[in-house]
Image (cartoon, rainbow, N blue to C red):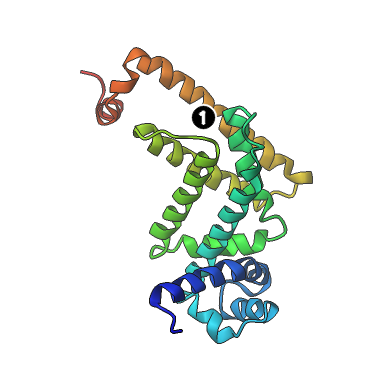
Amino acid sequence: MNETAADIDHSLDALRLKLAPEIALSAVFDGWGDEALEAAAKAKGIDPAVARLAFPGGAMDMIAAWVESVDAAMVAHFSDGSLDSMKIREKIRALVWFRLASITGMEEAFSRALAIQAMPQNAPRALQLGWSSADKMWRLAGDTSTDYNHYTKRAILASIYAATLAVFVNDESEDKAESAAFLDRRIEGVMKFEKAKAQLLGGDREHFDVARFLGRLRYGYR
């Protein structure tokens, strides 16, 4: 039976996720390039030529696949309902910390990935990856918002995650204590902001005009 284009795409997607963690391990020493890809392919018993087909975009495709593999591992880990009894701040902390713990020992690979993502041609995709991961975390935390809160929550969480990652990769404290404290401070700051926002909106929460509010912040009340 001949494979359809959809079948091939599906097979390549599965191959990307299979190879991504192994590529990340190799990237610690070899960077996000062909050497890491070849090493990962050989480790998994896959023809390197076939592996290359799964990453036509080169380094950014490899990094994106790694992020997606962490997303998948996070979803699988928390599918047991362990988040259900937690408060919202505890859920977000647990989700962010799981992701951070998943790169422990691979800080060098992540630092190299950050440098690649920061390139102008890669910045839009890097932002998209951050947004997607934040969206998955909020959904696991039980968020069902569809109004402006849907977007502000994800933007804020993506910012918290990115800032904590930057601290984490350079953190040499025992058990990453400095990163844990930094994350807790950022989450606490957001919770205070949300409380203040709720008081500001009061009974008009459902009719709040985001554009008007931001305009007032910028130009002042008239």
User: Is 159 displayed left or right of 41 in the figure?
Assistant: left
Q: Is residue 61 above or below residue 157?
A: below
The residue at the point 25 percent across, 19 percent down is: 221
Q: Secondary structure at mark 1?
A: helix
The residue at the point 60 percent across, 72 percent down is: 31
In the rendering, at what x and y percent does residue 39 appear?
Answer: 66, 79
Q: Give whichever of 134, 188 is nearer the camera.
A: 134
Residue type for callout 1: Val
Q: Give whichever of 177, 25 is nearer the camera.
A: 25
Give the residue furthest to the left: 222
Residue 69 image-quadrant placement: bottom right
The residue at the point 53 percent across, 43 percent down is: 137
Q: Is residue 212 above or below residue 82?
A: above
Q: Is residue 1 above or below residue 135?
A: below
In the rendering, at what x and y percent does residue 119 appear?
Answer: 44, 64
Q: Give whichever of 186, 11 is nearer the camera.
A: 11
Classed neighbour count for the residue bearing mark 1: other residues with Cα under 10 Å, few (<14), some (14–19), many (≥20): some
User: Is 203 displayed left or right of 212 in the figure?
Assistant: right
Tell me the quadrant of the picture where the C terminus can be found: top left
In the rendering, at what x and y percent does residue 72 appear?
Answer: 58, 55
In the rendering, at what x and y percent does residue 198 appear?
Answer: 42, 19
- Residue that badge 1 annotates: 190
Give the residue furthest to the right: 174
Give the residue furthest to the front: 1
Q: Give whichever of 182, 34 is nearer the camera.
A: 34
Residue 96 image-quadrant placement: top right
How many labels were placed on the picture? 1
